[in-house]
Image (cartoon, rainbow, N blue to C red):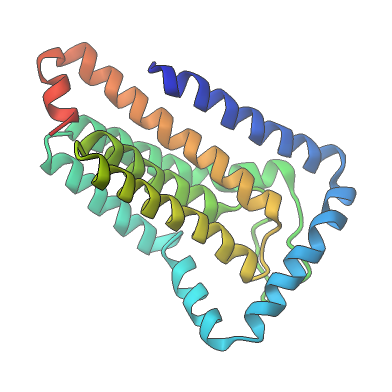
Amino acid sequence: MSRTLKFTIPIMLVGFMLLAILVTWNRNSLTRLEEPLTTWCAKFTTDSPTLRSIVVFSTSLGAGDRLLAIGFALTIALITNRLWIHGFVFALFELSAIKLSPFLKGVFERQRPPTTPLPISFDSFPSGHALGSAVVYGFMLIWAFHRCRNLRWRWSLLILIGIWIIWMLICRLLLGVHYLSDVTAGCLIGLTWSFLAWEIADHLVHRYFPKNHSSTINH
Protein backbone atom coordinates (compact mmCIF):
# COMPACT_ATOMS: atom_id res chain seq x y z
CA MET A 1 0.00 0.00 0.00
CA SER A 2 1.32 3.46 -0.91
CA ARG A 3 2.32 5.83 1.85
CA THR A 4 -0.52 8.22 1.03
CA LEU A 5 -3.21 5.55 1.13
CA LYS A 6 -1.70 4.02 4.26
CA PHE A 7 -2.72 7.17 6.14
CA THR A 8 -5.69 8.37 4.10
CA ILE A 9 -7.85 5.24 4.30
CA PRO A 10 -7.60 4.85 8.12
CA ILE A 11 -8.30 8.57 8.61
CA MET A 12 -11.46 8.35 6.49
CA LEU A 13 -12.59 5.20 8.28
CA VAL A 14 -12.04 6.82 11.68
CA GLY A 15 -14.03 9.85 10.54
CA PHE A 16 -16.91 7.62 9.45
CA MET A 17 -16.83 5.64 12.69
CA LEU A 18 -16.91 8.82 14.79
CA LEU A 19 -20.00 10.02 12.91
CA ALA A 20 -21.54 6.56 13.25
CA ILE A 21 -20.99 6.66 17.02
CA LEU A 22 -22.61 10.09 17.24
CA VAL A 23 -25.60 8.94 15.21
CA THR A 24 -25.96 5.81 17.32
CA TRP A 25 -25.41 7.13 20.83
CA ASN A 26 -26.20 10.84 20.63
CA ARG A 27 -28.69 10.97 17.78
CA ASN A 28 -31.15 13.48 19.22
CA SER A 29 -28.51 16.04 20.11
CA LEU A 30 -26.83 15.68 16.73
CA THR A 31 -30.15 16.08 14.93
CA ARG A 32 -31.00 19.23 16.90
CA LEU A 33 -27.60 20.63 16.00
CA GLU A 34 -27.96 19.88 12.29
CA GLU A 35 -31.64 20.66 11.70
CA PRO A 36 -31.24 24.45 11.34
CA LEU A 37 -28.74 24.05 8.49
CA THR A 38 -30.90 21.46 6.70
CA THR A 39 -34.01 23.61 7.11
CA TRP A 40 -32.24 26.72 5.80
CA CYS A 41 -30.85 24.85 2.79
CA ALA A 42 -34.25 23.42 1.90
CA LYS A 43 -35.93 26.82 2.18
CA PHE A 44 -33.19 28.48 0.14
CA THR A 45 -33.74 26.04 -2.72
CA THR A 46 -37.54 26.25 -2.50
CA ASP A 47 -37.37 30.02 -2.92
CA SER A 48 -35.36 29.63 -6.15
CA PRO A 49 -37.02 27.33 -8.75
CA THR A 50 -34.09 27.72 -11.14
CA LEU A 51 -31.57 26.65 -8.51
CA ARG A 52 -33.80 23.76 -7.52
CA SER A 53 -33.93 22.52 -11.12
CA ILE A 54 -30.13 22.63 -11.30
CA VAL A 55 -29.85 20.80 -7.98
CA VAL A 56 -32.33 18.11 -9.00
CA PHE A 57 -30.49 17.49 -12.26
CA SER A 58 -27.09 17.42 -10.52
CA THR A 59 -28.23 14.98 -7.87
CA SER A 60 -29.63 12.69 -10.57
CA LEU A 61 -26.01 12.14 -11.64
CA GLY A 62 -25.18 10.80 -8.19
CA ALA A 63 -27.34 7.66 -8.10
CA GLY A 64 -29.44 5.26 -10.10
CA ASP A 65 -29.14 4.51 -13.79
CA ARG A 66 -27.25 7.69 -14.63
CA LEU A 67 -24.49 7.04 -12.12
CA LEU A 68 -24.31 3.43 -13.33
CA ALA A 69 -23.96 4.70 -16.89
CA ILE A 70 -21.15 7.06 -15.84
CA GLY A 71 -19.48 4.19 -14.00
CA PHE A 72 -19.83 1.97 -17.05
CA ALA A 73 -18.27 4.67 -19.23
CA LEU A 74 -15.39 4.96 -16.75
CA THR A 75 -14.91 1.20 -16.85
CA ILE A 76 -14.74 1.24 -20.65
CA ALA A 77 -12.29 4.15 -20.54
CA LEU A 78 -10.04 2.26 -18.13
CA ILE A 79 -10.09 -0.87 -20.28
CA THR A 80 -9.45 1.16 -23.42
CA ASN A 81 -6.39 2.65 -21.71
CA ARG A 82 -5.06 -0.87 -20.95
CA LEU A 83 -6.11 -0.64 -17.29
CA TRP A 84 -8.43 -3.60 -17.62
CA ILE A 85 -7.77 -4.92 -14.10
CA HIS A 86 -8.53 -1.49 -12.66
CA GLY A 87 -11.69 -1.39 -14.77
CA PHE A 88 -12.80 -4.82 -13.58
CA VAL A 89 -12.09 -4.10 -9.89
CA PHE A 90 -13.79 -0.70 -10.13
CA ALA A 91 -16.90 -2.28 -11.66
CA LEU A 92 -17.05 -4.81 -8.81
CA PHE A 93 -16.68 -2.11 -6.17
CA GLU A 94 -19.27 0.12 -7.81
CA LEU A 95 -21.79 -2.73 -7.88
CA SER A 96 -20.99 -3.66 -4.28
CA ALA A 97 -21.55 -0.04 -3.24
CA ILE A 98 -25.15 -0.38 -4.45
CA LYS A 99 -25.67 -3.02 -1.74
CA LEU A 100 -23.44 -1.31 0.83
CA SER A 101 -25.56 1.84 1.04
CA PRO A 102 -28.92 0.24 1.96
CA PHE A 103 -27.12 -2.16 4.31
CA LEU A 104 -25.59 0.70 6.30
CA LYS A 105 -28.89 2.60 6.29
CA GLY A 106 -30.58 -0.48 7.76
CA VAL A 107 -27.93 -0.73 10.47
CA PHE A 108 -28.29 2.88 11.70
CA GLU A 109 -31.99 3.49 10.86
CA ARG A 110 -31.80 7.26 11.09
CA GLN A 111 -34.97 9.01 10.00
CA ARG A 112 -34.97 11.53 7.19
CA PRO A 113 -35.09 15.25 8.03
CA PRO A 114 -38.60 16.75 8.35
CA THR A 115 -37.80 18.87 5.29
CA THR A 116 -37.80 15.79 3.04
CA PRO A 117 -40.38 16.74 0.37
CA LEU A 118 -41.66 13.27 -0.51
CA PRO A 119 -41.83 9.97 1.37
CA ILE A 120 -38.56 8.09 0.87
CA SER A 121 -38.38 4.46 1.88
CA PHE A 122 -34.66 4.45 2.66
CA ASP A 123 -33.24 5.86 5.90
CA SER A 124 -30.94 8.86 6.07
CA PHE A 125 -27.50 7.74 7.31
CA PRO A 126 -25.26 7.54 5.38
CA SER A 127 -26.29 9.30 2.18
CA GLY A 128 -26.45 6.85 -0.70
CA HIS A 129 -25.97 9.62 -3.25
CA ALA A 130 -22.83 10.83 -1.46
CA LEU A 131 -21.50 7.29 -1.15
CA GLY A 132 -22.12 6.38 -4.78
CA SER A 133 -20.75 9.68 -6.08
CA ALA A 134 -17.61 9.34 -3.99
CA VAL A 135 -17.00 5.82 -5.31
CA VAL A 136 -17.36 6.72 -9.00
CA TYR A 137 -15.98 10.25 -9.08
CA GLY A 138 -13.41 9.42 -6.42
CA PHE A 139 -12.02 6.63 -8.58
CA MET A 140 -12.02 9.05 -11.49
CA LEU A 141 -10.06 11.51 -9.36
CA ILE A 142 -7.43 8.90 -8.46
CA TRP A 143 -7.02 7.92 -12.11
CA ALA A 144 -6.63 11.58 -13.10
CA PHE A 145 -3.90 11.93 -10.49
CA HIS A 146 -1.96 8.96 -11.88
CA ARG A 147 -2.60 9.60 -15.56
CA CYS A 148 -1.78 13.29 -15.95
CA ARG A 149 1.94 13.97 -16.09
CA ASN A 150 1.46 17.69 -16.68
CA LEU A 151 1.10 19.23 -13.21
CA ARG A 152 -1.19 22.01 -14.41
CA TRP A 153 -3.63 19.56 -15.99
CA ARG A 154 -3.34 17.18 -13.06
CA TRP A 155 -4.27 19.76 -10.44
CA SER A 156 -6.93 21.28 -12.66
CA LEU A 157 -8.63 17.92 -13.00
CA LEU A 158 -8.26 17.14 -9.31
CA ILE A 159 -9.81 20.46 -8.34
CA LEU A 160 -12.68 20.12 -10.84
CA ILE A 161 -13.56 16.57 -9.80
CA GLY A 162 -13.17 17.48 -6.12
CA ILE A 163 -15.52 20.44 -6.53
CA TRP A 164 -18.03 18.20 -8.30
CA ILE A 165 -18.00 15.69 -5.44
CA ILE A 166 -18.51 18.47 -2.89
CA TRP A 167 -21.31 19.93 -5.04
CA MET A 168 -23.08 16.55 -5.01
CA LEU A 169 -23.02 16.62 -1.21
CA ILE A 170 -24.33 20.17 -1.11
CA CYS A 171 -27.16 19.21 -3.48
CA ARG A 172 -28.48 16.66 -1.00
CA LEU A 173 -28.53 19.34 1.69
CA LEU A 174 -30.22 21.84 -0.62
CA LEU A 175 -32.99 19.34 -1.32
CA GLY A 176 -33.53 18.94 2.41
CA VAL A 177 -33.29 15.15 2.30
CA HIS A 178 -30.13 14.71 4.39
CA TYR A 179 -28.26 16.11 7.36
CA LEU A 180 -24.65 17.25 7.07
CA SER A 181 -23.40 14.17 8.93
CA ASP A 182 -25.26 11.94 6.44
CA VAL A 183 -23.51 13.31 3.37
CA THR A 184 -20.15 13.56 5.15
CA ALA A 185 -20.32 9.93 6.25
CA GLY A 186 -21.41 8.80 2.80
CA CYS A 187 -18.54 10.67 1.20
CA LEU A 188 -15.99 9.23 3.64
CA ILE A 189 -17.05 5.62 3.18
CA GLY A 190 -17.40 6.11 -0.59
CA LEU A 191 -13.90 7.56 -0.95
CA THR A 192 -12.57 4.73 1.19
CA TRP A 193 -14.26 2.29 -1.17
CA SER A 194 -12.74 3.95 -4.25
CA PHE A 195 -9.26 4.15 -2.71
CA LEU A 196 -9.42 0.48 -1.73
CA ALA A 197 -10.54 -0.46 -5.24
CA TRP A 198 -7.59 1.38 -6.77
CA GLU A 199 -5.13 -0.09 -4.29
CA ILE A 200 -6.35 -3.66 -4.85
CA ALA A 201 -6.22 -3.24 -8.64
CA ASP A 202 -2.76 -1.70 -8.42
CA HIS A 203 -1.57 -4.56 -6.22
CA LEU A 204 -2.90 -7.17 -8.66
CA VAL A 205 -1.18 -5.48 -11.60
CA HIS A 206 2.08 -5.10 -9.67
CA ARG A 207 2.03 -8.75 -8.59
CA TYR A 208 0.93 -10.50 -11.77
CA PHE A 209 1.98 -8.03 -14.48
CA PRO A 210 5.06 -6.26 -13.06
CA LYS A 211 6.50 -5.41 -16.49
CA ASN A 212 3.39 -3.50 -17.47
CA HIS A 213 2.80 -1.83 -14.12
CA SER A 214 4.41 1.55 -14.64
CA SER A 215 3.51 1.81 -18.32
CA THR A 216 -0.20 1.18 -17.76
CA ILE A 217 -0.58 3.42 -14.73
CA ASN A 218 1.09 6.37 -16.45
CA HIS A 219 -0.29 5.66 -19.90
Q: Residue at x 80, y 39 (%)?
A: 22
Q: Residue at x 67, y 51 (%)?
A: 182
State left or right for residue 126 relative to residue 95: right
State which quadrant residue 46 falls in: bottom right
Quadrant of the snapshot with the C terminus? top left
Q: Residue at x 51, y 73 (%)?
A: 55
Q: Which residue is at the front of the view, 141 or 150?
A: 150
In the rendered view, would you say 35 is above or below 46?
above
Q: Residue at x 62, y 70 (%)?
A: 174
In the rendered view, would you say 68 is above or below 14?
below
Can residue 116 be seen? no
In the rendered view, would you say 10 is above or below 120?
above
State left or right for residue 165 relative to residue 84: right
Q: Which residue is at the front of the view, 197 or 10?
A: 10
Quadrant of the snapshot with the N terminus? top left
Q: Position of residue 53 (x, y in %)?
A: 50, 81
Can residue 65 be seen? yes
